[in-house]
Amino acid sequence: MFVCRACSITWLPTSYVLGNVSALAVGVWAIAQRDSIDAVLMFLIGLAVTILTDIVHFGLYYAEVRSHYERNLGLFRFCGGMAILSLLLKPVSCIFVYQMYRERGGEYNVNFGFPRITRNRDAYQSIDHQDQSGSSASSYNQAEGGKPGPSSY
């Protein structure tokens, strides 16, 4: 019978695994649904919550369980190192997910302290409210010549 050697180290509780798998599932949903702002916001909140819960899990279980794995100490250190590396990369992932949220039209304005290049959108004309009494209506009437039907050359 084949038994995975890495699976024998179960020092983190099931809540750690379920929390991270849930955040991963919401992340796949956020990437798959490109027009959904809610999915990206839920993924961002899920990442922030898993950062806090990972810190609590490591604080509660790492030192206590380490003494039980003296025979497989190298494997235990590797698994713990990968879990800590995942925790260290989550804030970077939060920054990228926040940028994705802003690109999709998110409204929350949170400044992480990084300088960014913004475009001046004052010069753009809004297409939501067109002025019908302006020059666009008069140029249309001049092109038609005020006569119905085809124009003759």
Image (cartoon, rainbow, N blue to C red):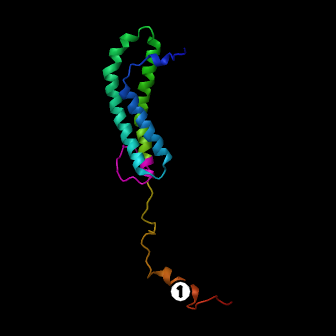
Given the image, on which type of amino acid does mark 1 rest?
Answer: Asn
Q: Residue at x 33, y 16 (%)?
A: 63
Q: Quadrant of residue 10?
A: top left
Q: Quadrant of residue 152?
A: bottom right
Instruction: Answer whether residue 92 is visible to the viewer in this image.
Output: no
Dividing the image into 4 quarters, which one contains the N terminus? top right
Q: Is residue 101 above or below residue 133?
A: above
For label 1, the crowd category at 10 Å Cα-Cα, with few meaning under 14, some 14 to 19 and many 20 or more, is few
Secondary structure under the numbered disc 1 in the rendered image: helix
Q: Based on the picture, tell me whether residue 108 belongs to the magenta stretch.
A: yes
Q: Which residue is mark 1?
A: 141
Q: Which residues are magenta?
A: 100-116
Residue farthest along the top direction in this orientation = 71
Image coordinates of residue 142 in percent, x first then y, are 55, 87
Image coordinates of residue 85 in percent, x first then y, are 44, 27
Q: Is residue 67 above or below residue 19?
A: above
